[in-house]
Amino acid sequence: MSLDLDVDPALAAAVLEIEKHHAQGGWDQPARLYALVDTADLVQHEPDLAEQLGLDAASEQGSLTPVEQEELPAGQQLEQVLPGILWPPVVVGCAAVVERLVLPPAADGQVPDDPEEALAFAREHPEAQEVRIVAGVTRHGAAYCALRLRAEDHDQAVMGGSDLVPALVELLQATLAEEPDAPDERSTQEGTDGSR
């Protein structure tokens, strides 16, 4: 897969690393959230964690390290959790992984308004496709997404681009918004130390 020229290469590499990690775990996984931290800063400020991850400043200069966060609260969708998250300044970006059913454009206007009915409609639709989405954003406005269809579950079929899932990208970007009035209450997730 070739990358667009205007894509942030560090972000794209982090998103693709996360996608590959989840692909190794198979399908039917819960949604996950990652903090993206500057690798050189991580090596400098968290040397023990960097050593556990096999990182060093020289080889990882200019890259982002994904740090997996705690599991989402039981019974809540990622889209419900994201509006309550604000990352601390050390987090330069974030990424999310979700599995969804997608319908063909011909199904537009046929999906029921009720969420449970809509899900049942999607599950029963003969052209529904299961997809794993990994979307990542940075504080300076970059975005990159990777999509893998369950029906074409191999690395060469992973689609990538900056505008594949605009609604999820927008939700993720909102978690990186500045909150000057509340500098000490910036995250509902605990730190970026890799603990779960």
Image: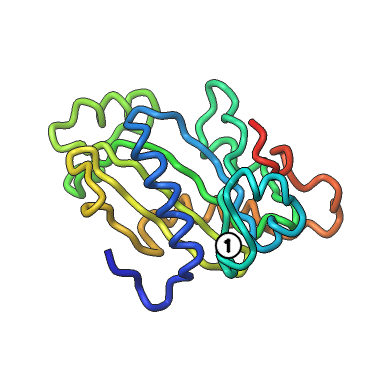
The front one of 100 and 23 is 23
x%, y% of residue 169?
49, 55
| Mark 1 element type | strand
x%, y% of residue 15?
45, 54
Q: What amino acid type should be assigned to the residue bearing mark 1? A: Thr
Apparent side of residue 92 relative to residue 107 in the rendered image (left or right):
right
Quarter where residue 140 is shown: bottom right
Residue at 57 percent across and 59 percent down: it is 64
Apparent side of residue 103 relative to residue 30 in the rendered image (left or right):
left
Quarter where residue 42 is shown: bottom right
x%, y% of residue 132?
34, 41
The front one of 173 and 14 is 14
**Image quadrant containing the N terminus:** bottom left
Apparent side of residue 120 relative to residue 50 in the rendered image (left or right):
left
Is 30 placed above or below 49 here? above
Toward the bottom, the furthest residue is 5
Per the image, the residue denoted by label 1 is 138
Quarter where residue 117 is shown: top left
Residue at 70 percent across and 42 percent down: it is 193
x%, y% of residue 17?
43, 51
Instruction: Count numbered badges in the picture.
Output: 1
Residue at 78 percent across and 56 percent down: it is 179
Apparent side of residue 191 relative to residue 163 in the rendered image (left or right):
right
